[in-house]
Image (tube, rainbow, N blue to C red):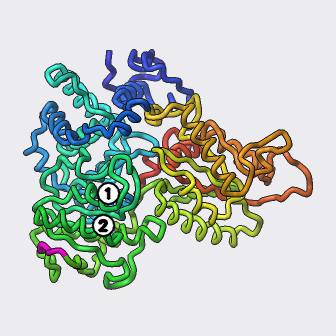
Amino acid sequence: MRYRKNVDRSEEIPQHAIKSNLTLSNTSILSCNFYVISTIHALNNLQSNAATLQNIVTSKDVGRYHNLSRTENCLNRIGVSMEDLDSLSVIHVSGTKGKGSTCAFTESILRAHGYKTGFYSSPHLIEVRERIRINGTPVSRENFTSYFWQVHDRLEQSKKANDDYMPGYFKFLTVLAFYIFLKEKLDVVVLEVGIGGTYDCTNTIRNPVACGIASLGFDHTAILGNTIEKIASHKAGIIKMGASAFTVPQIDSAMPVIQEQSNKVQAPLHVVPPLSDYPGTLPELGLDGSAQKWNASLAIQLANTWLNKKTNRSNGDQQLQNNHLGKIPTASAFPLNENFRIGLKNCVWPGRYQTIKRDGITFYLDGAHTLASIKNAVDWFRDKSVSEAKNTGGSVARILIFNLTGNRQCKTLLQPILNAEIDYAIFSPNILDDQSSLPDSINRKETSDSAVRVCNENLSTWMNLQGLSNSIDGTETVNEVNCCSTRSINEAITIINSMRDVKSLNSKDTSVNITKYDHFQIFVTGSLHLVGDTLQLDERKQYRSTCILDLYKM
């Protein structure tokens, strides 16, 4: 029996939830009713497990080349034709870092102009419905569930006629997003690429209005290749005939690759100007961090192009013409009207350069997970934490909470964090705790044991970078080396709260000579999933049932 509507909490748990073996605390049940649990469990069943993912990487699985045809097949099975998909007015954005922020700025600008917007992004921080937003707000639980089962049932019923094929987690959500956007009759859809671009299932769209490429760097190299040129080729694969393409300034070797793709499909390509080039006062940005200035400029050009095509206006002195190989022209910096400025200022994008202040503690959260983004996050944290320390009027301790996923190089990414002058480091897996995680947080790509093992390896790497012994014998304690690993983010926060209570990095040492701290600054980075778990735990400790709508309040 499938529950399609809200049920009273006193009623029995649906069979879907019972079979799922989900362990839920009273807190989770209060914040996530049973029919939602059933829905998310069905979605989680589409996740690939750790062993399957490893086989894909090691075998260089060619399945990605069928990604677009399989996505189209799934759309057809739920009654969505490619012609239906063509009716969506899409802005498509790829990149290694900054693509999500660019999309958030773009959506906010167009919403400020009065248009009904859709926004598809990944990953989610707390609840999966964050990935699909209408007018800046995550789809409601009721609507998400209703649309989910409409799509899931049609795919399930047509499975036998299609070689028993069901889409994986991300492909299903992409198909679901397209379905929802068509049902909601939107003016514009802002679409963030998942991984790469050319073979990403979001690239099923055929007629984007504008395409943007945010900053490129090294990530997902097992899939995209280990050179900037190979990565740029994937990212530029979203550029299509009829679209106007824009890129932020890139590493020199990436530019010819992007330009080659734009010439191939006869799409005009421009480099966006610095934000300071736009006439008038510098616009105020709702997102913190110096890197957001380039993301904002890219968003301005994408939104402006869409507005011009929507209203059949020309682009003024900006000639959007195909370019021969050579220097790529810079887009015109035009005066920003009030709606542009409102959109930029009111933009909300949680988990990126985000600061949350609590009693005796300030959280600095950024999901940076590439070398360049880690460096930017460290610079941001240092600037903000130093400024806060000056206004605190007492001693301040800096604590790192860190994790990495996806076989990224730990030593390379931890090295820049040494510049943050960390007093204590905690290495935690992306596991909220054992009892009360929302089902949206379940990740079958990695076992809990392997996640903890990675944290211990990260701890060892950090100790080596600090010049400390990487093994703690009976004469040392974790506090004496000022770092540790945990089995969950809840355990990490418990350690920090204990430190705050005694105003010391060693919660067990009550001697009068130990250094006392008046305030604790917590730098959470390395993984967006880690940031999401921290936000979820923080909101729970603030006695709120959910923080999703609070996170995305405009």
Cα–Cα span, label 1 and label 2: 8 Å
Q: Mark 1 or 2 closer to N-term? A: 1
**Secondary structure state at the residue bearing disc 2:** helix
**Left or right: where 265 falls relative to 515:** left
By secondary structure, the bulk of the magenta-drawn segment is best described as loop
Q: Which residue is mark 2?
A: 254
Instruction: Please give the name of the residue rendered at 11% of the width and 50% of the height, measured from the top-left corner.
Output: 87
Residue at left offset 51%, top offset 31%: 447
Q: Does any portion of residue 203 appear in the rendered image?
A: yes
Spot occupied by residue 207 in the image (x, y as percentages of width and height): 12, 55
Q: Quadrant of residue 42?
A: top left
* Quadrant where the N terminus is found in the figure: top left
Q: Quadrant of residue 471?
A: top right
**In the rendered structure, which amino acid carries the disc numbered 2?**
Ala
Locate the C terminus by quadrant: bottom left
Report the magenta residues as a range. Answer: 321-325
Q: Is residue 152 magenta?
A: no
Residue found at the very far front of the displayed protein:
59
Q: Is residue 149 left or right of residue 369?
A: left
Disc on res. 231: 1
- Label 2 Cα crowd, 10 Å radius (few <14 / some 14-19 / many 20+): many
In the rendering, at what x and y percent does residue 101 appear? Answer: 38, 60
Find out whether residue 324 is within the magenta segment. Answer: yes
Q: Residue at x 63, y 72 (%)?
A: 387
Residue lying farthest to the right in this orientation: 512
The kind of secondary structure element at disc 1 is helix
Give the residue at x 15% y 81%: 316
CB atoms of marks 1 and 2 within 8 Å: yes
The answer to which image quadrant residue 321 occupies is bottom left
What amino acid is labelled 1 in the image? Answer: Ile
Question: Can the viewer see residue 6 in this picture?
Answer: no
| Left or right of 510 on screen, residue 188 | left
